[in-house]
Image (cartoon, rainbow, N blue to C red):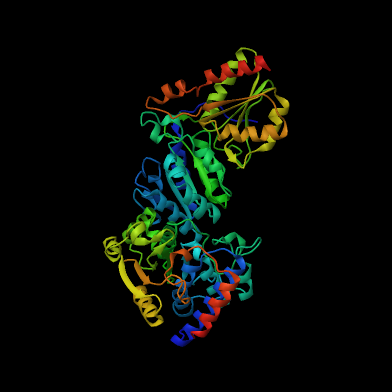
Amino acid sequence: MFRSVEELKETARKIRINIIRSLAVSGSGHTGGSLGLTDVFTALYFGILNHDPKNAKWAERDRLILSIGHVAPVLYATLAQSGYFPVEELLTLRKLGSRLQGHPGREHGLPGLELSAGSLGQGLSVAVGMALAGKMDQKKWHVYSVHGDGELQEGAIWEAAMSAAHHKLDNLTAIVDRNGVQIDGKTSDVMEIEPLTKKWSAFGWEVFECDGHSFKDIVSTFNRAKATIGRPSVVIAHTIMGKGVREIEGDYHWHGKAPSEEQATRFIKEIQDHS
Amino acid sequence: MSYQLQNRGNKPTRFGFGEGVLEAAEMNPKVVGIGADITGSVSMNFFAQQFPERFFSMGIAEQNCMGVAAGLALEGKTPVFSTYGVFAALRTTDQIRISVCYNNLHVIIGGAHAGISVGPDGATHQALEDIAVMRVLPNMTVVSPCDATQTKLAAIKAINELNGPVYLRFGREAVPDFTSEGQNFNFGKGQLMKEGKDISIIATGHMVWEALQAAYQLAKEGIDARVINIHTIKPIDEEIIIWAAKETKAIITAEEHQVMGGFGSAVAEVVVKNFPVPMDFVGLNDSFGESGKPEELMEKYGLTSRNMVNRIKNILSSA
C-alpha cells in the first residue's frame, strides 16, 4: 500500500494530466478544485485508504464520499489511475451515456463511486449515517468525506457535525479543501468561515491541519486523524486552487471553467516539465 | 370485494404506523430508526423503547436526519425517519431528491400529522403540499393509507417488500378504523370499497371514509356511487381509474391536501390521457389552513361527505 513520496508525486502528475485532458475534451467542468485536491486524493487512494480496485464493492473497504460533487474530475481520474476502470474512459466526461456524469451519479454504474452527490452540504450527513452503520456492526472500515471550504457555509454541514460528535463517530474523518476561494471570489469576502479550527473543535471534533501539497504531511496527518478515539476527526487541508498550473493557481475564475485545447496542451506541458 | 366497512372505533393512523414499524423491526434486524425530537408524537417511541440500540436521536435537524438515513441505507440498513409531514417532505426536499432518490435508497420517510386535521396548531404544521412534492421525485413511492389498520400494513410492507424510497403519509387525529387486518393490500393496487355505476369517488387517506359516507347518503337519493381507495398515489393504479372512467359517468377525487399538483391531479393525469370524463376535485384550493378543531376545519374547507354529495349532484346534473 505505502508508496514513496516520489512515487506519489509521479502518480499525482499523471492524475493532473488526465484531469486536464478530460476537462478539455468535455469543454466544461471544474478545473481549479480538481487540480487543488489532486495531491490529497493521490495520498488517500495510494497511501491511506484500504481498498481494492479489482473488487470495488469489497465489504471491508474504507469508504470515501465526495460531498463536493463538482470536483468529480479528480475523483474519476484517481479512480481510473487506481485501476477501477480504464484511463481512456476519462475522455467521456460529461458526455451523453457516460458513466462519468458532471456530478457523480451512481445509477450510471461507475466502479468505486460510493455516492451520487453534488448538492452542497449533504455529504457529511450521509457520511454520518455510514459511520453509524459501521459502529453498529462493529466494522473496522473508516469513512472519509470530502468537503469544500465554501461548502461549510451550508447550515446542514453543522447539523451533521453536531450529530457526528454526539454519536462519538471516531470512524469518520472529514476533509476540508481549504483553498480560500469560491465562485464569487475569496471565501473571506463571500462569507467568512473563520475561525475554522475553533468551530470544528467547538462542535466536538478533533482538528488537524496539513499542507495539502506535501505528501509527507498529508499521509502523517491522516494517519493521526484515523487514530483519534471517541470523537470524529477533521483534516483541514490547505491547498491552492489550480495547483500545478501557475497561470491559474489561486485564481477563482478557474473554479468552474474547463481549459481550451490550446490551454490544455500548455498546462500539460508545464506539469510534465516540472517533474 | 369483501371489505369490512364498519368502524371498529376511532384510532389515529400514526398509531398504525408505530405498530407497523415495531412489528417489522421485530422480524427484521436491519430496521433502524432516526428521531428528530418528536419521537412520541409520531409514534416512533414504540420502536425506540423496544430497540434503543437501533434508534438514533439526531435532534431538531431534519436535513441531517435525511442524509443520515441515506448513509444508513447505503450500508444495508432500512432506516425509518418520521417527523411531521411539513418537515419530512418540505424542509428536507433537496436531501430527499439527491441523497435519497437519486441514490435510489430504501429509506422509509414517515410524513406524520398530514392534512388540515392537525387542527389547532394551524397552517405552519398542516402538511398540504407534501403529496405534490413527493410524487414528482423519480424513484419515490408515495403511500397514503385510509385508516390505522391499513397504515400498519403499509409500514410493514414498505419496510419488507419495497426497495427504493418511500413516503408514507398519515395523520394525527383519531379517525374511523374500518379496513380488516386480512385485507388484500398491494402497493400500486387501488381498492374497490363500494360498487356503483353513476359516479366514482376516488379518495385517499382518511377521505376514503368520508367518501363512503357520501356514497351511503347518495344511495338514499337514488345515486349509485362507486368508492375507490387509492392508497398508493405513486405508482398509481391506472387500471382501476380507467375502469372507473369507462363504467361511471364522472369522477370526483378527495384528499386532505392541495388539489393543485396533488392526488386529484394524479388521478386526472390518468383520466385525461386514457378516457376523459367530467371530473371534480375535493381538497384545499390554493390556500393555507388555520387554527380550529379538526372537524371545524374539515367543514370549513369542504373536506366532508356533505360537500362531496353536493359536488356530485352538481356534476351529474350538468353532465
Along the line of sight, the residue nearer the viewer: B242 or B27: B242
Task: Work out which residue is located at the far top of the displayed protein and give it.
Answer: B221
A10 over B236 or under it: above or below: below
In which quadrant of the rendered view does residue B229 lie? top right
Along the line of sight, the residue nearer the viewer: A43 or B49: A43
Along the line of sight, the residue nearer the viewer: B197 or A224: A224
Q: Is residue B241 visible to us here?
A: no
B310 over B121 or under it: above or below: above
The residue located at (61%, 66%) in the rendering is: A26
B16 over B294 or under it: above or below: below
The residue located at (42%, 28%) in the rendering is: B289
- Residue B35 shown left or right of residue B313 in the figure: left
Q: How many marks?
A: 0
Q: Is residue A63 visible to us here?
A: yes
Along the line of sight, the residue nearer the viewer: B201 or A162: A162
The residue located at (57%, 24%) in the rendering is: B212
In which quadrant of the rendered view does residue A180 lie? bottom left
In percent of width and height, residue B98 lies at 51, 53
In percent of width and height, residue A223 lies at 37, 77
In percent of width and height, residue B208 lies at 55, 29
In percent of width and height, residue A114 lies at 52, 65
A155 over B243 or under it: above or below: below
